[in-house]
Image (spheres, rainbow, N blue to C red):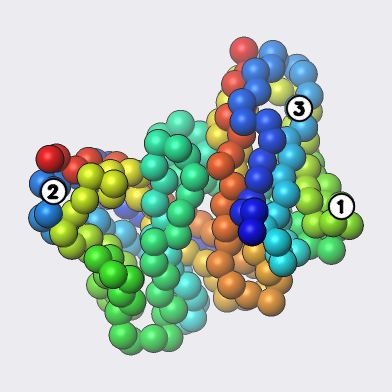
């Protein structure tokens, strides 16, 4: 069974600075998808960025980028030029490409990010 | 284009009661997944519905059941509520052909 681990329950960053959130996972599959979701106090889960395991190039979405290390099973999220609106709970998630897995997402425990003005 | 909607927003029940939560998927989506998120935890997969059938199920007891209607909307039913069922219940929709899961705002269930 696949597992996702986020070892940082809380992180803090100064506005305009850069912060990196860590995530490790365990799987025996060679192909899969990894995601970072943001959950603000409004509770709405919002997709931040996704990475396909077969792609060597790290995904980037504006101020958000990932460092995907497949051999190490590591998937960290870097937020550049942090803004007050980035404050939220961030979840790392795994999804198998196997149709029979139903496309379920396996989430980590989350990292609470606070942004100081 | 309306995203995923869920009702009600909040719900308070007592132990032993039954509850029904509702979800309408994003336009164009045919698959609905349900997740339970306990306070301070990541969401846990309950089950997924496609073509009005349960496609896959997570590690949840039979007290948790669901249904999908011809218009792709879905219900989550929980019988014999326990205090431990208190959580945020998230619905996510997607297309069976692939693509991302889009989440609704959730229903906060409190069991007293």
Q: Are marks 2 and 3 on the same chain?
A: no
* Residue at the image point whose x is 12% and y is 54% from the top: A16
Mark 3 highlights which residue?
A: B19
In the rendered view, does B68 fall on the left or right side of B106? right
Q: Position of residue B8 (x, y in %)?
A: 68, 31
Marks 1/3: CA distance? 18 Å
Q: Chain of mark 1?
A: B
- Packing grade of label 3 (10 A; few <14, some 14-19, many >=20) is some
Query: Of label 1 and label 3, which has the lower sequence position?
Result: 3
* Residue at the image point whose x is 62% and y is 66% from the top: A103
Foreground residue, A19 or A116?
A116
* Residue at the image point whose x is 65% and y is 64% from the top: B94
Name the image quarter holding residue A72. Answer: bottom left
Determine the secondary structure under disc 1.
loop
Mark 1 highlights which residue?
A: B69
In the rendered view, does B102 fall on the left or right side of B73? left
Task: Identify the disc placed on residue B57.
Answer: none
- Packing grade of label 1 (10 A; few <14, some 14-19, many >=20) is some
Mark 2 highlights which residue?
A: A15
Q: Check contact, mark 1 vs mark 3: CB within 8 A.
A: no
Mark in front: 2 vs 3: 2
């Amino acid at each position: 069974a696949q597992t996702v681990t986020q070892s940082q329950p809380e992180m803090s960053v100064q506005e305009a600075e850069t912060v990196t959130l860590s995530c490790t996972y365990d799987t025996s599959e060679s192909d899969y998808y990894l995601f970072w979701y943001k959950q603000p106090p409004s509770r709405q889960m919002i997709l931040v960025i996704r990475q396909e395991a077969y792609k060597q190039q790290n995904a980037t979405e504006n101020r958000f980028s990932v460092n995907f290390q497949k051999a190490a099973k590591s998937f960290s999220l870097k937020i550049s030029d942090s803004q007050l609106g980035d404050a939220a709970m961030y979840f790392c998630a795994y999804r198998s490409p196997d149709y029979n897995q139903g496309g379920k997402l396996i989430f980590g425990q989350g990292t609470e990010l606070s942004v100081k003005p | 284009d309306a995203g995923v909607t869920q009702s009600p927003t909040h719900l308070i029940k007592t132990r032993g009661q039954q509850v029904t939560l509702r979800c309408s998927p994003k336009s164009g989506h045919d698959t609905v997944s349900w997740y339970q998120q306990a306070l301070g935890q990541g969401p846990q997969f309950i089950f997924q519905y496609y073509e009005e059938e349960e496609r896959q199920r997570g590690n949840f007891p039979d007290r948790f059941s669901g249904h999908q209607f011809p218009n792709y909307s879905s219900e989550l039913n929980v019988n014999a509520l326990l205090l431990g069922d208190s959580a945020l219940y998230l619905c996510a929709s997607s297309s069976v052909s692939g693509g991302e899961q889009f989440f609704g705002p959730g229903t906060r269930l409190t069991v007293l």
